[in-house]
Image: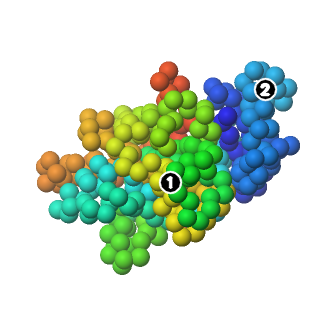
Amino acid sequence: MKLASLKAGGRDGTLIVVSRDLQTAVVARDIAPTLQHALENWEACAPRLNALSEALNAGDCTHAFALDMHALAAPLPRAYEFVDGSAYLPHVERVRRARGASVPESFYSDPLMYHAVGAGFYGPRDPVRVADEAYGIDLEAEVVIVTDDVPMGVSASAAEAHIQLVGLVNDVSLRNLIPDELAKGFGFLQSKPRSALSPVFVTPDELGDAWRDGKVHLPLLSHLNGEWFGAPEAGEDMQFNFAQLIAHAAKTRPLCAGTLVGSGTVANQDEARGASCLAEKRMLEIIAHGKPSTPFMKFGDRVRIEMLDRAGQSVFGAIEQTIERAED
Protein backbone atom coordinates (compact mmCIF):
# COMPACT_ATOMS: atom_id res chain seq x y z
CA MET A 1 0.00 0.00 0.00
CA LYS A 2 0.93 3.64 -0.43
CA LEU A 3 0.50 6.14 2.39
CA ALA A 4 0.71 9.94 2.52
CA SER A 5 -0.34 12.88 4.69
CA LEU A 6 -2.42 15.94 3.90
CA LYS A 7 -1.18 19.29 5.19
CA ALA A 8 -4.60 19.85 6.73
CA GLY A 9 -4.91 18.45 10.24
CA GLY A 10 -2.14 20.06 12.24
CA ARG A 11 1.60 19.54 12.57
CA ASP A 12 1.37 15.79 11.96
CA GLY A 13 -1.03 16.09 9.04
CA THR A 14 -3.91 13.76 8.19
CA LEU A 15 -3.20 10.20 7.07
CA ILE A 16 -4.47 9.15 3.64
CA VAL A 17 -4.18 5.98 1.58
CA VAL A 18 -3.10 6.61 -2.03
CA SER A 19 -3.87 4.52 -5.10
CA ARG A 20 -1.12 2.60 -6.83
CA ASP A 21 -1.21 4.97 -9.83
CA LEU A 22 -0.97 8.03 -7.51
CA GLN A 23 -4.17 9.49 -8.95
CA THR A 24 -6.68 9.09 -6.11
CA ALA A 25 -6.69 8.88 -2.34
CA VAL A 26 -8.97 8.37 0.63
CA VAL A 27 -8.73 9.73 4.17
CA ALA A 28 -7.84 7.03 6.71
CA ARG A 29 -8.82 9.00 9.82
CA ASP A 30 -11.15 6.25 11.08
CA ILE A 31 -8.18 3.87 11.20
CA ALA A 32 -5.41 6.25 12.30
CA PRO A 33 -5.45 10.05 12.40
CA THR A 34 -1.76 10.31 11.47
CA LEU A 35 0.97 8.11 10.05
CA GLN A 36 2.86 8.34 13.34
CA HIS A 37 -0.18 6.92 15.13
CA ALA A 38 -0.41 4.10 12.59
CA LEU A 39 3.25 3.20 13.02
CA GLU A 40 2.93 3.13 16.80
CA ASN A 41 -0.01 0.73 16.43
CA TRP A 42 1.16 -1.03 13.27
CA GLU A 43 -0.05 -4.55 14.01
CA ALA A 44 -3.60 -3.30 14.48
CA CYS A 45 -3.62 -0.56 11.84
CA ALA A 46 -1.70 -2.13 8.94
CA PRO A 47 -4.30 -4.80 8.02
CA ARG A 48 -7.11 -2.22 8.03
CA LEU A 49 -5.07 0.25 5.97
CA ASN A 50 -4.21 -2.50 3.52
CA ALA A 51 -7.90 -3.40 3.14
CA LEU A 52 -8.69 0.25 2.47
CA SER A 53 -5.90 0.32 -0.11
CA GLU A 54 -7.32 -2.73 -1.89
CA ALA A 55 -10.76 -1.14 -1.98
CA LEU A 56 -9.34 2.14 -3.32
CA ASN A 57 -7.41 0.39 -6.09
CA ALA A 58 -10.52 -1.59 -7.01
CA GLY A 59 -12.54 1.62 -7.31
CA ASP A 60 -14.77 0.71 -4.37
CA CYS A 61 -14.20 3.78 -2.14
CA THR A 62 -17.12 6.19 -2.25
CA HIS A 63 -15.12 8.92 -0.51
CA ALA A 64 -12.09 8.78 -2.82
CA PHE A 65 -10.80 12.09 -4.19
CA ALA A 66 -8.29 13.22 -6.81
CA LEU A 67 -4.80 13.47 -5.35
CA ASP A 68 -3.25 16.96 -5.36
CA MET A 69 0.50 16.77 -4.74
CA HIS A 70 0.53 20.40 -3.58
CA ALA A 71 -1.89 19.52 -0.76
CA LEU A 72 0.54 16.96 0.66
CA ALA A 73 2.80 17.37 3.63
CA ALA A 74 5.68 14.95 3.98
CA PRO A 75 4.28 11.45 4.72
CA LEU A 76 5.78 11.92 8.18
CA PRO A 77 5.66 15.70 8.65
CA ARG A 78 7.96 15.28 11.65
CA ALA A 79 9.67 12.31 13.22
CA TYR A 80 11.15 11.50 16.59
CA GLU A 81 14.38 10.40 14.91
CA PHE A 82 16.03 10.66 11.50
CA VAL A 83 19.42 9.01 11.21
CA ASP A 84 21.23 9.12 7.90
CA GLY A 85 23.91 6.73 6.75
CA SER A 86 26.52 6.92 4.02
CA ALA A 87 26.14 3.43 2.60
CA TYR A 88 27.36 4.09 -0.97
CA LEU A 89 31.13 3.96 -0.81
CA PRO A 90 31.72 5.24 -4.38
CA HIS A 91 30.40 8.57 -3.10
CA VAL A 92 32.65 8.47 -0.03
CA GLU A 93 35.69 7.40 -2.04
CA ARG A 94 35.32 10.21 -4.59
CA VAL A 95 34.81 12.92 -2.03
CA ARG A 96 37.86 11.83 -0.06
CA ARG A 97 40.02 11.22 -3.14
CA ALA A 98 39.37 14.75 -4.38
CA ARG A 99 40.97 16.13 -1.24
CA GLY A 100 43.82 13.62 -1.28
CA ALA A 101 42.51 11.39 1.49
CA SER A 102 41.98 7.64 1.49
CA VAL A 103 38.97 5.79 2.86
CA PRO A 104 39.67 4.31 6.33
CA GLU A 105 39.40 0.54 6.46
CA SER A 106 36.67 0.80 9.10
CA PHE A 107 34.33 2.41 6.53
CA TYR A 108 34.07 -0.97 4.76
CA SER A 109 32.85 -2.82 7.85
CA ASP A 110 31.22 -0.19 10.07
CA PRO A 111 28.57 2.22 8.72
CA LEU A 112 29.08 5.97 8.79
CA MET A 113 25.98 7.69 10.18
CA TYR A 114 24.84 11.01 11.61
CA HIS A 115 21.79 12.30 13.46
CA ALA A 116 19.74 14.39 11.01
CA VAL A 117 16.87 16.87 11.41
CA GLY A 118 13.62 15.09 12.24
CA ALA A 119 11.68 17.96 13.82
CA GLY A 120 10.15 18.87 10.47
CA PHE A 121 10.29 17.84 6.81
CA TYR A 122 9.39 19.72 3.66
CA GLY A 123 6.45 18.38 1.68
CA PRO A 124 7.10 17.12 -1.86
CA ARG A 125 6.21 20.46 -3.51
CA ASP A 126 7.42 22.83 -0.79
CA PRO A 127 10.28 25.20 -1.67
CA VAL A 128 13.65 24.80 0.02
CA ARG A 129 14.30 28.04 1.87
CA VAL A 130 17.89 29.10 2.55
CA ALA A 131 19.17 32.42 3.87
CA ASP A 132 22.24 32.76 1.62
CA GLU A 133 23.44 31.18 -1.63
CA ALA A 134 26.98 31.43 -0.25
CA TYR A 135 26.17 28.49 2.05
CA GLY A 136 26.63 26.13 -0.93
CA ILE A 137 23.14 24.69 -1.48
CA ASP A 138 23.15 21.06 -2.58
CA LEU A 139 20.63 18.29 -3.17
CA GLU A 140 21.22 14.73 -1.95
CA ALA A 141 18.92 12.13 -3.51
CA GLU A 142 18.53 9.15 -1.18
CA VAL A 143 16.30 6.23 -0.28
CA VAL A 144 14.82 6.20 3.22
CA ILE A 145 13.02 3.57 5.29
CA VAL A 146 10.72 3.89 8.30
CA THR A 147 10.74 1.48 11.21
CA ASP A 148 8.33 0.31 13.84
CA ASP A 149 9.67 -0.04 17.39
CA VAL A 150 13.19 -1.50 17.22
CA PRO A 151 14.77 -3.02 20.34
CA MET A 152 18.24 -2.00 21.44
CA GLY A 153 20.93 -4.39 20.22
CA VAL A 154 18.84 -5.84 17.39
CA SER A 155 20.85 -7.98 14.97
CA ALA A 156 21.03 -7.16 11.27
CA SER A 157 19.28 -10.45 10.50
CA ALA A 158 16.33 -9.46 12.71
CA ALA A 159 16.29 -5.78 11.78
CA GLU A 160 14.73 -6.14 8.32
CA ALA A 161 11.44 -7.24 9.89
CA HIS A 162 11.21 -3.79 11.48
CA ILE A 163 11.18 -1.99 8.10
CA GLN A 164 7.56 -1.02 7.49
CA LEU A 165 7.79 1.73 4.86
CA VAL A 166 10.13 2.90 2.10
CA GLY A 167 10.41 6.31 0.44
CA LEU A 168 12.74 8.96 -0.94
CA VAL A 169 14.42 11.94 0.66
CA ASN A 170 16.19 15.04 -0.59
CA ASP A 171 18.71 15.44 2.22
CA VAL A 172 19.51 19.11 1.61
CA SER A 173 23.09 20.07 2.48
CA LEU A 174 24.83 23.43 2.84
CA ARG A 175 28.26 22.38 1.65
CA ASN A 176 30.22 25.53 2.43
CA LEU A 177 29.25 25.29 6.11
CA ILE A 178 30.39 21.68 6.47
CA PRO A 179 34.21 22.08 6.68
CA ASP A 180 34.20 24.40 9.69
CA GLU A 181 31.59 22.28 11.48
CA LEU A 182 33.47 19.02 10.92
CA ALA A 183 36.73 20.68 11.97
CA LYS A 184 35.22 21.17 15.42
CA GLY A 185 34.86 17.38 15.68
CA PHE A 186 31.21 17.43 16.74
CA GLY A 187 29.31 16.72 13.51
CA PHE A 188 26.67 18.50 11.44
CA LEU A 189 24.25 21.14 12.68
CA GLN A 190 23.95 24.36 10.66
CA SER A 191 25.06 22.60 7.48
CA LYS A 192 22.07 20.25 7.55
CA PRO A 193 18.73 22.09 7.28
CA ARG A 194 15.36 20.42 6.80
CA SER A 195 15.04 17.62 4.25
CA ALA A 196 12.15 16.88 1.89
CA LEU A 197 10.31 13.56 1.63
CA SER A 198 8.60 11.91 -1.34
CA PRO A 199 4.82 12.33 -1.73
CA VAL A 200 4.13 8.79 -0.56
CA PHE A 201 5.81 6.07 1.44
CA VAL A 202 5.11 2.48 0.43
CA THR A 203 5.21 -0.87 2.16
CA PRO A 204 8.10 -3.05 0.92
CA ASP A 205 5.73 -5.53 -0.74
CA GLU A 206 4.57 -2.72 -3.05
CA LEU A 207 8.05 -2.82 -4.64
CA GLY A 208 7.77 -6.48 -5.66
CA ASP A 209 11.09 -8.06 -6.58
CA ALA A 210 12.75 -4.61 -6.58
CA TRP A 211 12.87 -4.98 -2.79
CA ARG A 212 15.35 -7.68 -1.84
CA ASP A 213 18.34 -8.09 0.48
CA GLY A 214 17.24 -5.01 2.39
CA LYS A 215 17.78 -2.75 -0.65
CA VAL A 216 15.70 -1.09 -3.38
CA HIS A 217 16.90 -2.33 -6.78
CA LEU A 218 15.76 0.56 -8.99
CA PRO A 219 17.46 3.68 -10.41
CA LEU A 220 17.08 6.93 -8.48
CA LEU A 221 16.44 9.64 -11.05
CA SER A 222 17.39 13.29 -10.46
CA HIS A 223 16.87 16.36 -12.63
CA LEU A 224 18.22 19.85 -12.04
CA ASN A 225 16.49 22.73 -13.84
CA GLY A 226 14.84 20.23 -16.18
CA GLU A 227 18.13 18.59 -17.19
CA TRP A 228 19.03 14.98 -16.44
CA PHE A 229 21.47 14.88 -13.54
CA GLY A 230 21.79 11.23 -12.57
CA ALA A 231 20.14 7.82 -12.33
CA PRO A 232 22.36 5.51 -10.27
CA GLU A 233 21.01 2.10 -9.33
CA ALA A 234 20.04 2.19 -5.66
CA GLY A 235 20.58 -1.56 -5.27
CA GLU A 236 24.17 -1.50 -6.50
CA ASP A 237 27.33 -0.48 -4.63
CA MET A 238 25.42 -0.17 -1.35
CA GLN A 239 27.98 -1.38 1.14
CA PHE A 240 25.46 -1.67 3.98
CA ASN A 241 21.82 -2.58 3.47
CA PHE A 242 19.02 -1.04 5.51
CA ALA A 243 18.95 -3.90 8.01
CA GLN A 244 22.63 -3.30 8.74
CA LEU A 245 22.05 0.44 9.08
CA ILE A 246 19.22 -0.17 11.55
CA ALA A 247 21.37 -2.54 13.59
CA HIS A 248 24.14 0.05 13.68
CA ALA A 249 21.79 2.81 14.87
CA ALA A 250 20.19 0.55 17.49
CA LYS A 251 23.44 -0.82 18.92
CA THR A 252 23.19 1.20 22.13
CA ARG A 253 19.57 2.45 22.15
CA PRO A 254 16.13 1.39 20.96
CA LEU A 255 14.57 3.14 17.98
CA CYS A 256 10.98 4.28 18.37
CA ALA A 257 8.25 3.67 15.82
CA GLY A 258 8.49 6.26 13.06
CA THR A 259 12.28 6.42 12.99
CA LEU A 260 13.64 7.28 9.53
CA VAL A 261 16.90 5.72 8.35
CA GLY A 262 18.48 7.21 5.24
CA SER A 263 20.76 5.40 2.81
CA GLY A 264 23.08 8.31 2.14
CA THR A 265 23.66 9.76 -1.30
CA VAL A 266 23.05 7.07 -3.92
CA ALA A 267 26.13 6.55 -6.09
CA ASN A 268 27.58 3.89 -8.38
CA GLN A 269 31.08 3.05 -9.53
CA ASP A 270 29.80 3.62 -13.08
CA GLU A 271 30.21 7.38 -13.49
CA ALA A 272 28.07 7.33 -16.66
CA ARG A 273 25.02 6.98 -14.44
CA GLY A 274 25.54 10.51 -13.16
CA ALA A 275 25.35 11.73 -9.59
CA SER A 276 22.82 12.31 -6.84
CA CYS A 277 24.44 15.43 -5.43
CA LEU A 278 26.40 18.39 -6.77
CA ALA A 279 29.29 17.79 -4.38
CA GLU A 280 30.08 14.48 -6.05
CA LYS A 281 29.89 15.98 -9.54
CA ARG A 282 32.24 18.74 -8.40
CA MET A 283 34.64 16.20 -6.91
CA LEU A 284 34.79 14.31 -10.20
CA GLU A 285 35.63 17.60 -11.92
CA ILE A 286 38.39 18.25 -9.39
CA ILE A 287 39.82 14.78 -9.98
CA ALA A 288 39.69 15.23 -13.76
CA HIS A 289 40.59 18.92 -14.16
CA GLY A 290 41.97 20.15 -10.85
CA LYS A 291 39.01 22.39 -10.04
CA PRO A 292 35.19 22.24 -10.09
CA SER A 293 33.17 23.90 -12.85
CA THR A 294 29.64 23.09 -11.64
CA PRO A 295 28.23 25.63 -9.16
CA PHE A 296 26.05 24.84 -6.19
CA MET A 297 22.38 25.71 -6.50
CA LYS A 298 21.08 29.25 -6.76
CA PHE A 299 17.76 30.82 -5.84
CA GLY A 300 15.24 29.85 -8.51
CA ASP A 301 16.87 26.51 -9.32
CA ARG A 302 14.53 23.53 -9.55
CA VAL A 303 15.14 19.97 -8.32
CA ARG A 304 13.19 16.82 -9.21
CA ILE A 305 13.86 13.44 -7.58
CA GLU A 306 11.89 10.33 -8.51
CA MET A 307 12.09 6.56 -8.78
CA LEU A 308 10.37 4.68 -11.59
CA ASP A 309 9.59 0.99 -11.62
CA ARG A 310 10.64 -1.25 -14.50
CA ALA A 311 7.40 -0.36 -16.31
CA GLY A 312 8.22 3.33 -16.08
CA GLN A 313 5.62 4.16 -13.43
CA SER A 314 6.46 6.46 -10.53
CA VAL A 315 6.72 4.48 -7.30
CA PHE A 316 6.77 7.22 -4.65
CA GLY A 317 5.78 10.25 -6.71
CA ALA A 318 8.30 13.00 -7.39
CA ILE A 319 9.94 15.47 -5.05
CA GLU A 320 9.78 18.75 -6.99
CA GLN A 321 11.28 21.78 -5.29
CA THR A 322 12.44 25.30 -6.03
CA ILE A 323 15.26 26.92 -4.09
CA GLU A 324 14.06 30.15 -2.45
CA ARG A 325 15.57 32.87 -0.30
CA ALA A 326 14.41 32.60 3.30
CA GLU A 327 12.68 35.81 4.32
CA ASP A 328 13.31 37.41 7.69
Query: Where does residue 115 sit, x and y in percent of width and height?
Result: 50, 65
The residue at 51%/29% (across/down) is 209
Viewer-closest of 289 and 237: 237
Question: What is the secondary structure assignment of the residue under circle 2?
Answer: helix
Distance from Cα at disc 1 to Cα at disc 2:
35 Å
Quadrant containing the C terminus is: bottom right
Res 186 label: none
| Within-10-Å neighbours for mark 1: few <14, some 14–19, many 20+ | some
Tell me: 115 left or right of 66. left
Tell me where residue 119 appears, x and y as whole percent.
62, 63
Left or right: 53, with 212 as reference point: right
Q: Nearer the viewer, mark 1 or mark 2?
A: 1
**Dot 1 corresponds to which residue?**
156
User: Measured along the vertical axis of the image, is residue 5 above or below residue 131?
Assistant: above
- The secondary structure type at the circle numbered 1 is helix
Residue 298 x/y as whole percent: 39, 52
Q: Nearer the viewer, residue 213 or 289?
A: 213
Residue under the point 32% across and 51% down: 89
Name the side, left or right, on which 262 lies relative to 233.
right
Q: Earlier in the sequence, mark 1 or mark 2?
A: 2
Q: Amino acid at mark 2?
A: Ala
Q: Which mark is residue 55?
A: 2
Quadrant of the snapshot with the N terminus = top right
At horizontal 39% and vertical 55% (from top left) the residue drawn is 86
Residue 27 visible somewhere in the drawing = no
Question: Does 89 appear above or below 313?
Answer: below
In front here: 280 or 295?
280
Question: Height in image: 85 above or below 281?
Answer: below
> The residue under label 1 is which amino acid type?
Ala
Q: Position of residue 172 (x, y in %)?
A: 46, 55
